[in-house]
Amino acid sequence: MASVHKRGTGYQVRWKEPRPGGGWATRSATFPDAAAAKRFRAEVERARADNRPVLSPKEGAGAGVEAMIDGYLQHLARTKAGVTTATYGTHLEVFTRYLHSRTRVSVLPPSLLTFQTLADYHEWLADPATGRRHRARTDDTRAVMVHTVERFWQWAFTRQRRGDWTGLDYPDSLEVKRVMPRDNLAPTWPQMDAAVLHATGWRRDLLFVLRCTGLRVRQALGLRWDDVDLRAGVLHVRGELGKSHQERAGRWIPLAPVLVEELAAWGAREGFLVPCGRAARSPPHRGTQLDWTAPGAPPALWARRPHHAFRKGFATELKRAGADGEAIDFLIGHTAASTRGRHYTDPRAHDLVAAVAMVPRLAAPNLLQLRLGEG
């Protein structure tokens, strides 16, 4: 079907393709070494076996989509939080897996980035067989994953104009069905307490920290004892743990008295504050879902984001208790308050100590409180 011949200082691959009007056309391509020629010959044979056109060497060689993605992720690592870059990388890895399953080429050519590819990829993501543990992806998850590809495409096209690579069409975008926002419901102190009391081991410690600080779960898992000053009752949320641009500047916040009392009884004070034993310091969603479910908290409060529910509960309950809104925003690292505080004020301008003093002690609620959401 295809053959390799030595030609001067290079190697030539020759093969035949059917002409549109009938008959066969002989084609050839020259490569600088035998290894490259043999790889292309294998690609020609795969293309013929799959009854698809053979991509020319100019399309199949050089900077492929995966090389572009590597450059994009390196760019993101300079501007985004580590967890954000990792999430983008996961989404784009799924995309390249899809492209390989459709093209069966070793190097994915830039010409594959088209509007039709986005549309086909969006449909492919709807198949449960392509999801984790063969579970179907939601409409909003599919939209986010396609949008990640669009953002990568836009970045790559801009770089192409600088001469880094060739073959990309003008970036396009796929319009998808708008997903209605979820109800913004938050758990009460009794509901959060019930989840904490149901948890055991390091997971119980994690949930208690989330309940008393309103931090993001990866921030809480990344805290070290060096970040805590129990005598002064303050916590240093290091910039490297931040998600937004403002959070990556880092901040000091006061600890709730109930959390200071709890941490003082934890024993060894070295290493991670919550030694979960997970190499990636990733949140244990399944266990925490059970901690909400077993006491009877309504799924609408925590479904799909069982750790983020503590962040919402912390902010909502403090607001109900009369805490200053800007103080709450500063404590949880909200963008608006962080921006104002960073440019014009320091934490002394916010009633932070008064706010965390409103965090109550852990208490076992009754079943009726849990189900009705009464504090």
Image (cartoon, rainbow, N blue to C red):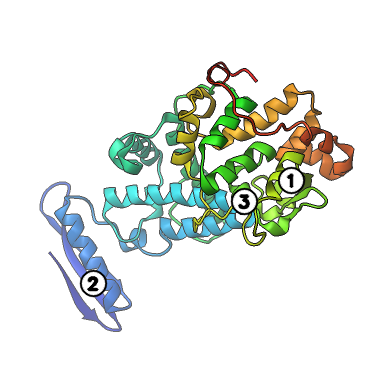
Instruction: Report the amino acid beneath label 3.
Output: Lys
Q: Where is residue 252 drawn, in percent x and y? A: 78, 48
Residue projecting furthest to the left: 23
Q: Which dot, 3 or 1, sits closer to the camera?
A: 1
Q: Where is residue 105 drawn, in percent x and y? A: 28, 57
Q: Residue at coordinates 51% horizontally, 24% vertically from top-left?
A: 297
Q: Is residue 271 visible?
A: yes
For marks 3 and 2 on the same chain, the one whose residue lies earlier in the sequence: 2
Quadrant where the N terminus is found in the figure: bottom left
Q: CA distance from mark 3 to mark 1?
A: 32 Å
Instruction: Report the amino acid beneath label 1.
Output: Val
Above or below, 270 against 239 in this view is below
Task: State if disc 1 and disc 2 touch (CB < 8 Å).
Answer: no
Question: Can you tell which mark lies on residue 260?
Answer: 1
Task: State if disc 2 and disc 3 touch (CB < 8 Å).
Answer: no
Q: CA distance from mark 3 to mark 2?
A: 41 Å
Q: Which structural element holds mark 3?
A: loop
**Relative to 138, is 236 on the left or the right?**
right
Above or below, 118 against 368 in this view is below
Q: Residue at coordinates 76% horizontally, 23% vertically from top-left?
A: 321
Residue under pointer 3: 80
Task: Give whichever of 27, 267 is nearer the camera.
Answer: 267
Q: Which dot, 2 or 1, sits closer to the camera?
A: 1
Instruction: Report the amino acid beneath label 2.
Output: Lys
Q: Which dot, 3 or 2, sits closer to the camera?
A: 3
Task: Give whichever of 345, 307 is nearer the camera.
Answer: 307
Q: Residue at coordinates 55% horizontally, 37% vertically from top-left?
A: 307
Q: CA distance from mark 2 to mark 1?
A: 66 Å
Q: Is residue 179 visible?
A: no
Question: Can you tell which mark lies on residue 38?
Answer: 2
**Relative to 141, is 47 on the left or the right?**
left
